C-alpha cells in the first residue's frame, strides 16, 4: 500500500516503523527537520519536511495516489484538516487522531465521514475502555475480545500458586481433557516463545492464552488466580484517560482521583459527579496513606510521566493494593515494568498501532491487536473459499514456525484449535504471530 503518515512525535514514528517493516511504501511528513533526519537514519521510507495541512505538501507526498493517509499529530485540528484535504486530493482512506471524545459520537462520526474522514481514533478513549474492562475482569493482566467475546486473549503472570508450573503442555492436556483454552505464547526473560507440546511453564512466565468464555474459570484455577472484587479504586492523573475511566466507573465503584494541577481539578469537578477529587502529588506517601491507599482494591496511574506511573504503582503494590495499572508511553520500559510487579501496562502507541494496522493487511483481516511488552500480534483472519488454510487439518498444514493458531469462531461459536481441527470457509481464525509471520500467514487465507 501507499501510505502517508503525518505525525509530530513518537506515535507517528512508531506507526511508521511498524508499517515500514511490512513492505508498504511509506511517506512521513513532519515540520521538524531534526525529527525527519532521525527517521531517515533508522527507517527505509520517504520523508518530507513540511506542514501536512498544506495542500502543496500533500501534493508533493502524492496524496492523490495514497491508499491510506494517517494523521496522528498531538493536536486534533491539524489531523482533521490533513485528512479532509487528503481525501479531496484523492486518497482512498483517511484516519485522523482526535482528542475531543465528543467527536466519537455516532452522529459526529457521520458528519466527519461526509467531510472525507473515514475513521477517527482516540488512543485515550481506547485506553480508558481497556482499564474498565480489566477492572471488571480482574483475573487477567491483559484481555482482548474477538467476535464479541466468543474468543478472548488473556495474559496472566504465573507465580508459585499456578498449578501448571514445571508441567508441559502435553502433560496439562493429558490431565485435563476438556480444556476450553489454549496457550499461544509465553514471554520469559525478555523473549517471546511460541510453545509446543513439550514446553514447560516456569514461575514468572507471562502466558498468553486464547479462551472461550467458559474457559475463564479454568484459567483462573490453573493459573492460581482468584477473582478480585474491585470496589474501591484510586486513579492518579486527571487527563483524558483518567477522566474517562472515572466517568465510566463512578456509578459502580468508589473512586478517588489525585491530580497535581489545581485548575484541572476544578475542571474535573464539573464533569465527575461521584468521584472524590484530590489536589496533590501522588508521590507523596503521606497523602496516599491519609487517603487510605491500603484499603484500595485497585490503583491506576495514568499521568503523562511514565516513571511516575511505574513508581507510584510499585508503591501501591508494596502498601497492599491488589491490582495495579500503569500508563507507560516509553515502549522500552514495558518489559521492565511487567517484571518488577506491575500487573498491567497500558501503552497508547500500541493501542493506536493496532487500530491503524487493521486497515493495512487486506480484507481478510478482521481484527489485529499489538501486545504490550511483546514483539508479537494477535490477528483474526477470515478464511476465503479455496484458500490454503482450508485444505487440510491444522496438523497437516505447513504453517510458519513463528505462527500458532489459537481458536476459531464458526457460526457464532468459539472453538479452541487442536491439531485435528479443519478450518472451513468463512471461519474467523485467531492467530498469534511474531512480526516476521504476519505477511506469510495472511497469504494462506486468500
Image (spheres, rainbow, N blue to C red):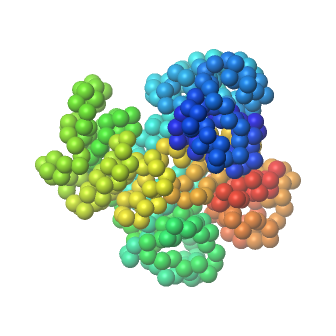
On screen, residue 114 versus residue 352, left or right, reads: right
- Relative depth, front residue between 129 and 280: 280
Q: Is residue 10 above or below residue 143?
A: above
Rendered residue at 86%/53% (across/down):
386
The residue under the point 74% across, 43% down is 24
User: How far across and down, in percent of the image, does residue 209 sit?
Assistant: 55, 63
Judge whether residue 361 can be spotted in this image: no
In the foreground, 366 or 425: 366
Q: Residue furthest right?
A: 386
Residue 431 x/y as whole percent? 66, 58
Residue 83: which quarter of the image?
top right
Which is more toward the observer, 95 or 141? 95
Quadrant the N terminus occupies: top right
Question: What residue is at 60 percent from the left and 24 percent from the top?
Answer: 51
Q: Does residue 30 show up? A: yes
Give how far across and how far down residue 156 sits, in percent: 46, 64
The residue closer to the viewer here, 78 or 127, is 78
Amino acid at each position: 500500500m501507499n501510505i502517508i503518515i503525518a505525525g509530530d512525535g513518537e506515535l507517528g514514528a512508531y506507526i511508521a516503523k511498524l508499517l515500514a517493516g511490512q513492505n508498504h511504501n511509506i511517506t512521513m511528513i513532519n515540520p521538524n527537520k531534526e525529527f525527519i533526519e532521525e527517521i531517515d537514519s533508522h527507517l527505509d521510507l520517504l520523508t518530507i519536511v513540511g506542514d501536512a495541512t498544506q495542500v502543496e505538501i500533500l501534493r508533493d507526498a502524492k496524496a492523490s495516489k495514497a491508499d491510506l493517509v494517517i494523521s496522528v499529530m498531538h493536536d486534533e485540528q491539524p489531523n482533521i484538516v490533513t485528512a479532509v484535504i487528503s481525501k479531496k486530493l484523492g486518497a482512498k482512506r483517511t484516519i485522523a487522531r482526535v482528542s475531543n471524545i465528543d467527536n466519537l459520537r455516532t452522529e459526529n462520526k457521520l458528519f466527519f465521514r461526509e467531510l472525507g474522514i473515514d475513521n477517527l481514533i482516540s488512543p485515550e478513549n481506547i485506553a480508558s475502555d481497556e482499564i474498565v474492562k480489566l477492572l471488571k475482569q480482574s483475573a487477567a493482566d491483559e484481555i482482548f475480545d474477538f467476535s464479541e467475546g466468543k474468543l478472548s486473549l488473556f495474559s496472566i503472570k504465573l507465580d508459585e500458586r499456578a498449578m501448571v508450573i514445571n508441567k508441559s503442555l502435553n502433560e496439562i492436556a493429558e490431565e485435563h481433557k476438556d480444556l476450553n483454552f489454549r496457550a499461544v505464547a509465553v514471554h520469559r526473560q525478555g523473549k517471546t516463545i511460541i510453545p509446543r507440546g513439550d514446553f514447560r511453564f516456569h514461575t514468572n512466565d507471562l502466558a498468553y492464552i486464547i479462551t472461550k468464555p467458559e474457559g475463564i474459570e479454568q484459567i483462573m484455577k490453573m493459573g492460581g488466580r482468584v477473582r478480585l472484587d474491585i470496589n474501591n479504586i484510586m486513579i492518579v492523573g486527571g487527563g483524558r484517560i483518567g477522566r474517562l475511566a472515572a466517568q465510566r466507573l463512578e456509578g459502580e465503584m468508589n473512586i478517588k482521583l489525585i491530580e497535581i494541577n489545581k485548575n484541572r481539578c476544578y475542571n474535573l469537578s464539573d464533569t465527575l459527579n461521584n468521584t472524590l477529587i484530590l489536589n496533590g502529588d501522588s508521590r507523596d506517601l503521606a497523602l496516599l496513606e491519609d487517603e487510605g491507599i491500603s484499603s484500595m482494591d485497585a490503583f491506576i496511574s495514568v499521568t503523562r510521566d511514565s516513571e511516575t506511573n511505574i513508581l507510584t504503582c510499585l508503591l501501591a503494590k508494596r502498601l497492599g493494593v491488589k491490582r495495579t495499572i500503569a500508563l507507560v508511553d516509553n515502549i522500552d520500559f514495558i518489559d521492565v515494568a511487567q517484571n518488577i510487579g506491575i500487573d498491567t501496562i497500558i501503552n497508547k502507541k500500541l493501542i493506536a498501532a493496532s487500530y491503524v494496522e487493521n486497515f493495512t493487511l487486506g480484507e481478510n483481516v478482521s481484527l489485529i491487536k499489538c501486545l504490550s511488552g511483546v514483539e508479537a500480534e494477535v490477528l483474526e483472519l477470515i478464511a476465503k473459499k479455496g484458500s490454503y488454510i482450508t485444505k487440510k487439518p491444522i496438523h497437516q498444514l505447513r504453517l510458519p514456525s513463528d505462527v500458532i493458531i489459537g481458536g476459531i469462531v464458526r457460526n457464532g461459536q468459539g472453538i479452541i484449535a487442536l491439531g485435528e481441527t479443519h478450518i472451513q470457509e468463512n471461519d474467523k481464525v485467531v492467530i498469534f504471530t511474531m512480526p516476521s509471520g504476519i505477511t506469510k500467514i495472511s497469504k494462506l487465507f486468500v
